[in-house]
Amino acid sequence: MKNILLTGGNGFIGRNISEQLSGEYNIFAPNSAELDLLDAGAVAAYLKKYKVTDIIHAAVYNPKRRNVSREAELGANLRMFYNLAQYTDDLDKMIYFGSGAEFDKRSPIHMAREDDFGKTISVLNDYSLSKYLMNLEALRSKNIYNLRLFGVFGKYENWQTCFISNLCGKAFYKDNLIKIDREEIKRCH
């Protein structure tokens, strides 16, 4: 049976994955206190201890949740990714979650095609730059896969703060749909 390390297992995406796969695979979903993905030594020890065969990387560094500066976001997202990616030669595969933020958003994102990636670079923030750089690494790798997500919503999502579900909730409760805070949109970007 595969031993899968699921990072971000307490988040919206991670909780859904864990729920769906836990009957078929051994899922190890440590929280950040149990495994600090920023600590390369801790990552190496964890992979060895639990004989991890695959990684599903759903964790992202969220400065708002940690109450730290946004300047740490780029470095932290990349360190977490590369602390895992450096072991992919010993694994079957690593899947991580990309984002529409990897594409130039000066054009409508729904018109983006896979072969548009990298033709132009529109780095709007550290999050989009980290996702862009992770995709470059995945393209070079033989077993790192970018599962790019667009507009995901559903079970375990915080509908009060995520854009799509927030609009649905406002419509359901007959709230004012026009008053959308720009920060509200950025939170789920």
Image (cartoon, rainbow, N blue to C red):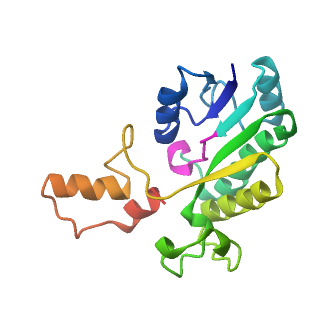
Residue at (73% x, 46% y) in the render: 81
Q: Is residue 8 left or right of residue 184?
A: right
Q: Visible in this render: residue 38?
A: no
Residue 161, placed above or below residue 182: above
Residue 108 against residue 156 in the figure, above or below? below
State which quadrant residue 188 falls in.
bottom left
x and y percent of residue 34 in the render? 65, 24
Between 124 and 90, the one lying in front of the other is 90
The reply, left or right, for residue 185 in relation to residue 139 is left
- Image point (54%, 22%), residue name: 22
Residue 123, compared with residue 42, is above or below; it is below
Q: Quadrant of the N terminus?
A: top right
Report the residue at 65% width, 38% height from top.
56
Image point 60% across, 57% down: which residue?
A: 70
Total marks shown come to 0
Residue 108 higher or lower than 74, as above or below:
below
Where residue 160 appears, as percent x and y from the top left, is 31, 49
Most foreground residue, 79 or 156: 156
Q: Is residue 89 magenta?
A: no
Q: Which residues are magenta?
A: 57-66
Residue farthest right in this picture:
89
What is the x, y in percent for residue 119?
A: 70, 79
80 sits to left or right of 8? right
Can residue 134 be seen in this snapshot?
yes
In the displayed structure, does residue 166 sit left or right of residue 21? left
Q: Position of residue 155 (x, y in %)?
A: 36, 38
